[in-house]
Amino acid sequence: MSPTHPRGGSVRRPSSRGRAGGSPARRTRRPGAAARNRRRRSLRGSAQLRLRTGFVFIAVVLSFFGARLVQLQGVDPQRYAALAAAEGGTVTVELPAGRGEILDRNGKPLADSVDGRMVVADPSMTRATAPALAKFLAQRLHVDYFSTLSALTEKHSRFAYIARRVPAALALRVVDAAQAQGFTGLDTRNDPVRAYPNHDVAANLVGFLGTDGPLAGLEMTFDKQLAGTDGSETYEVGAGNRIPLGQSTITPARNGTDLHTTIDEDLQWYTQRVLRQTVLGARGDSGFAIVQDTHSGEILALADYPTYDATNPQAAPAADRNSLAMTSPYEPGSVEKVLTLSGLIDAGKVTDHTKLVVPPQLQSGDRQIHDWFPHPTLKLTLAGVIAQSSNIGTAKAARLFHGDQLRRYLTRFGLGRPTNIGVNGETAGILPSSAAWDQMTADRVAFGQSVAVNGVQMAAAVNTIANGGVHVDPSLIQGSATTSTGQVVGTDHTTTRRVVSADAARQMTDMMERVVDPTAGTAPGAQVPGYVVAGKTGTAQRVGSTCRCYNGQFTVSFAGFAPADKPRFTVYVVVQNPRNGGGGGSVAGPAFSKIMAFALRRYGVPPTGARPSQIPTTW
């Protein structure tokens, strides 16, 4: 029975079928849903409208820039570059060439280049603050205030150099500090800085660079080869910046060429240390030491004292910056006797056994010749004359020469002319002319006075005996190099010439071995344990720079080679004005021994097992 309505009617149940084909009946919507949907559709429409508007705006802007770019690049680029340049100008910037290195014989740098900067300015931007900025830069870069002020205020210019070859860290730090203080217009450019990694090692040879270029040594002599050629870049600037489309011209830099020397850095270092100890120990003024390869003539070490630090040359007196061994002539003293008596033997006038009567003094013109030690009349062989370093015996023997025959021998040994090894300012020495060659001159020259040499000249002359009587040109440069004056030097151009016979050289070597004999010679301290040494001492009076006369000062030296029977190195040590009373044997002899021993060990030269000469020194 159907339920009844309260009012008496029956109640109909909802149909399970819809009105259209039986689909479910539509649910009743909540109040406000339609309004919310309308708002959502309205917001979406507004966002889309704004997006479309933004795209249109961006397209318009890009179109404007595109049109401007076409105008600048395609329609009339030169006209617009000219308009920008009218507000600026052109700038020419140097492109520094890389400087060649100076290397030792093993490729170790004696001088090279490291990262550096030049500090530059745009005067159009620095003019307003120039006084304060110039003071700032002078304090931090140690540049001159007034020249800096002039650069910062230069008219009609957009580029000025403030400082060159500044260490990179310092240059960047200064520019950053200037900007932090409100200064504008400073910048840096690449500008390599010269470095000397070993400070004083070979400094007197290598030299150094100043602000405006090389000022000494190999840096100056071979500047054209080392420097290369700087390049440049010229471009237009406007409104404080470079014009991207302006005119630009670049000339590339051409880097310099390395210079390879014959110097052995380690041997050079050791030789300098021994020399310094020797000069200071003798309380001398100065000195030098040379190590030469006997057969090739190559200079393995050339040490000077005083020396200086090439990284700070201004800290040393100018006189200490050159190689005194090459630029300061001196009288060699008794080392000269090696050349005199070798020439006599070669000329057939004497032998190593020739007997000589040596009186207490020898008359020479209006003067008398004396020996370094007082003695009665002595009976010496020629070997004894060398071992005892007798001036009288040498002068008596040298009188066997005819005319200027001794002078001609000394010329062949290399005296009186520069070695041309490539050292700027090298002296040729002084060898009296044939016209001035009288008996008094010949007597004095025979034992090393009245003649002047440079150190390498004398080392090469003694090396002639070590090399069997053949003179080989000394060399400082490996291969070939051209000096700034156009002179070609180097081992590729070494020449040799026979000066005395091999037999004369052998006899002289036997006599020189007696010099280091403790029972017969003047320089036992020059011996090298395990090796046979041939050498000669030297003591010569010095001419004073003021009085131009002999003033009681002396040059003492020792020259020799080892192993004496198979020579490998020649070493020459000279000390000027020792104040400890020592001579060539006691001052220079021990230094020779240390340097020679180091060289022999370094190059693995074994003892030959030979025994020293026992040639008689008296009769």
Image (cartoon, rainbow, N blue to C red):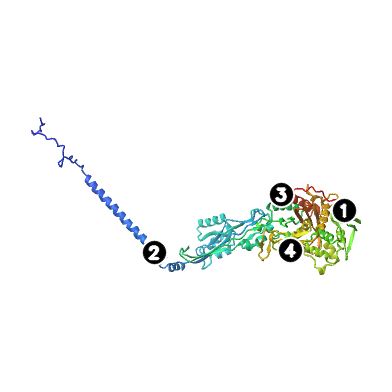
Q: Nearer the observer, disc 3 or disc 4?
A: 3
> Dot 4: within a 10 Å radius of its alpha carbon, few (fewer than 14), some, or many (20 or more) residues?
some
In front: 467, or 379?
467
Quadrant of the frame with the N terminus: top left
Q: Secondary structure at mark 4?
A: loop
Q: Amino acid at mark 4?
A: Pro
In front: 99, or 347?
347
Q: Position of residue 255 (x, y in %)?
A: 59, 60
Whole-number angstrom distance, CA of label 1 to CA of label 2 = 103 Å
- Look at mark 1 in the image and give the residue it sits on: 617
Q: Does residue 592 sit above or below 454 in this rendering? A: above
In front: 510, or 367?
510
Q: Position of residue 105 (x, y in %)?
A: 67, 55
Q: Is residue 522 visible?
A: no
> Dot 3: within a 10 Å radius of its alpha carbon, few (fewer than 14), some, or many (20 or more) residues?
few
In front: 603, or 325?
603
Which of the two labelled residues, at mark 3 and mark 4, occupies the earlier sequence position? 4
Q: Residue at x 81, y 65 (%)?
A: 407
Residue sitting at the far left:
8
Whole-number angstrom distance, CA of label 3 to CA of label 2 = 74 Å
> Dot 1: within a 10 Å radius of its alpha carbon, few (fewer than 14), some, or many (20 or more) residues?
many
Q: Secondary structure at mark 3?
A: helix
- Look at mark 3 in the image and give the residue it sits on: 602
Which of the two labelled residues, at mark 1 and mark 3, occupies the earlier sequence position? 3
Q: Amino acid at mark 2?
A: Arg
Q: Amino acid at mark 3?
A: Arg
Q: Secondary structure at mark 1?
A: loop
Q: Which mark is residue 418?
A: 4
- Look at mark 2 in the image and give the residue it sits on: 68
Q: Position of residue 140 (x, y in %)?
A: 57, 57
- Mark 1–mark 3 contact, CB under 8 Å? no
Q: Nearer the observer, disc 1 or disc 2?
A: 1
